[in-house]
Image (cartoon, rainbow, N blue to C red):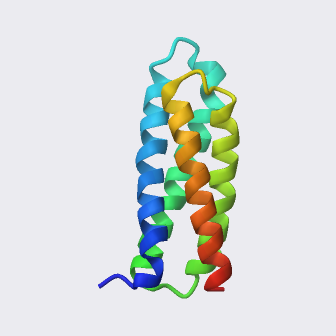
Amino acid sequence: MINEKFRECIDACQQCVIACNHCANACLHEEDVQQLSRCIRLDLECATFCSAAVQVMSINGKLSAELCELCSKICLLCAEECEKHDHMDHCRDCALTCHKCAEVCGQMATEHA
């Protein structure tokens, strides 16, 4: 059973993984992929951190708060990059999801540090 104190953060991270993977994949199908390379890299890194955070929180890991703090930071970096391409729906949606995840992860990190 997942510790309920992590439920909201786990849900936000899972949504972020989906949004980031979708964004990276969609960026790969855009005309100027080279111009989107930083966005794609940050999408993939963010998805990886969020996925790791879900795994660690699901086992009530001792470093959950620290990992969520890092997750919040990468989510903000990813959101900022996606906002540069907000004329594309997938980047705009990813930025919104990343901002939400950053907020929830940051809150969890300070509450459970």
| Outermost residue to the top | 31
Q: For the point 68% across and 51% down, which residue is it?
A: 76
Vertical position of residue 22 compared to residue 56: above or below: above
Q: Position of residue 93 (x, y in %)?
A: 51, 37
User: Which quadrant is home to the N terminus?
Assistant: bottom left
Q: For the point 64% across and 83% down, which residue is it?
A: 111
Q: For the point 58% across and 14% down, which residue is it?
A: 32
Q: Nearer the viewer, residue 30 or 12?
A: 12
Vertical position of residue 108 compared to residue 94: above or below: below
Q: Position of residue 101 (x, y in %)?
A: 55, 58
Q: Position of residue 47 (x, y in %)?
A: 50, 51
Q: Quadrant of residue 60?
A: bottom left
User: Which quadrant is home to the C terminus?
Assistant: bottom right
Vertical position of residue 46 compared to residue 95: above or below: below
Left or right position of 6 against 109: left
| Outermost residue to the left | 1
Q: Quadrant of residue 26?
A: top left
Q: Nearer the viewer, residue 108 or 44?
A: 108
Vertical position of residue 22 compared to residue 109: above or below: above
Q: Nearer the viewer, residue 5 or 49?
A: 5
